[in-house]
Structures are given as structure tokens and as C-alpha cells.
Amino acid sequence: MTPAALAQVLWQARQPGQPRVSGPVCDASTLPDAAAAYAVQDQSLRWLGPVGGWKVGAAGPTQNPTHTPICAPLPAAGLLASGLALSPPRGALRGLEVELALRVAHDLPPQQQGLGDALLCTVFDAVLPAIEWVDSRLAGGQASPALLRLADLQSHGALILGPARPLGPAEPEPDLPTLGATLCWNGQTVASTVGGNPAQDLRRLVDWLIGHTARRGLPLRGGQIVTTGSCTGLLWAPEGAVSVQGRLGSWGEVGLSLIS
């Protein structure tokens, strides 16, 4: 199956009332490598509309190949403000995780291949607490082959953003190993962590993303949001109406209501 064909299958699964993708297309051999998965992402943008941001993460902080960062574009339509009421469609997953997000300060030149030794604030002008809603267009959900999940925008549903806090040269940069995060629903704390983001190294993530997006012909643009992986782990909200609140250390709070 070509990247364009798989992208169209995933797009169709996003439509109201349509089943998730199953059958032979979900076999681990469908995509040979990450480059093929990224090609599906690129093709998906034909239907998903403009890129409002990116999600990037890594399984660990080292140069081990299993810790290589991965990413996905975030449709602008799925970047939502804190306090909204979200009604996932019937059968959707209800995964939630608290994340640290950054706002891109200005368009990056296509030739820029990384952050280098520059301060974060030369590329990003704000930090935002975020909650990602994790969903899937694949019948196997999180049990699906990793490359298929990557092609499916790394299981992205929507990103809920709290108030932006300015990031400047006089302020300390966010530090993932010491960053605290909590996730609550219906007033009960379901996750409380310090240093819970497995990537650990924020600069490594954004350095890789800057180069990766430039090489794909999609360099970061001013106003886009970059979210940097789960700080609480992925938790599954119960069915029914759920009031959700997240806190990201001293960077602020973000919340939403899930409606059945």
C-alpha cells in the first residue's frame, strides 16, 4: 500500500461513524521503516489541513537507536484552549497525559538544522502546560505496530493548551528531570510525578525536531506549538463525564471536561 493510500484509509477512519482500520493493512509489514511512516504523515496533511504544531518524544535520553526521537505534525484544528468540553466520538480512546509545550517564536529558515548552543528562547517564546488526548484510527489502538501508530500521527487526538508563560533569556529553561506533573480527574489525583518524561533532555528533542522538520520541507513556523512527550504517563479516563485537571510544575495548569 502506498503512503497516499494508507493516509486516505486513516483519514476515512476519522470520519463520524466510520470503523477503525483493521485487517491486513494493520500488519507490521505494511510499513518498512520510519521514513515510510513519515511519508504517510505528509500525505495525511492533504486532508488534515494546516500544521498547527508538532509532537516530539523519545523513549530515553541516550543515543541508543531505540531512543531516537520520533514526531508527528499536529493539525491546527486540534489545538484547543483549556477549559473546553470535549466529546470524543463513540468508540474513541480516552487516553490523557500531561505534557510540556513550547510556542515557536518565529519562522525558522529551511536551512536551520538544529538548536546548537543557542538558548531555547531564541526559537521559542513561551512555555504552556498541555494535556494530550490520545486516540487512534487503528483497531488495535496502542497495541498496533509502532510504525503504524507513528503513521497515525503517533496516536494524536487533540492537544489542550493552558495559558502561555513567556520564556526569555533571564528565565531558567524548563528542566525535564526535575519537572513535576500531576493529572487529576473528578478531583482525584491519578498521577503525580517528578522527572516523568522518559526523554529527559528537552534540548535534544527540539534540536532533533528542528533538523527533522527542515529536511521534510516543513520547517517550524512562528506560532506553532511543540509538545514534548508525556510527563505523567498515559492514563485512561473512565467512561462518562469526567472533569480533568493537569498541573505542570510552576508552569501552570490546564483542564478540560470529557463528555460522553
Image: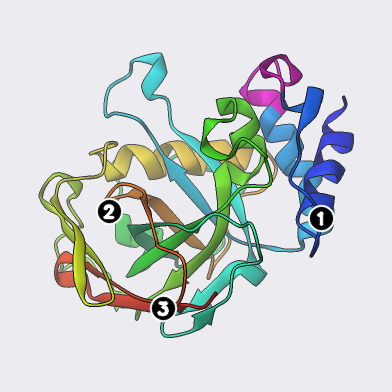
x and y, in percent, of residue 21 in the image: 76, 39
Judging depth in this view, the residue of 119 and 137 nearest the camera is 137
Could you say whether the residue bearing mark 3 is in a helix, strand or loop?
Answer: strand
In the picture of the structure, the residue carrying the numbered disc 2 is: 119
Mark closest to the chain's N terminus, 3 or 2: 2
Q: What is the distance, in whole Å, between disc 1 and disc 2 at their CAs?
A: 45 Å
Contact (Cβ within 8 Å) of mark 1 with mark 2: no
Residue 256 numbered mark, or none:
3
Q: Which range is magenta?
A: 27-36
At x 29%, y 45%, the residue is: 202
At x 70%, y 43%, the residue is: 217
- Is residue 111 shown to the viewer in this render? no
Mark closest to the chain's N terminus, 1 or 3: 1
Label 2 crowd (10 A; few <14 / some 14-19 / many >=20): few
x and y, in percent, of residue 251 in the image: 21, 71
At x 38%, y 34%, the residue is: 58
Mark closest to the chain's N terminus, 1 or 2: 1
Mark 3 belongs to which amino acid? Answer: Leu
Residue 18 numbered mark, or none:
1
In reply to whether residue 176 is colored magenta, the answer given is no
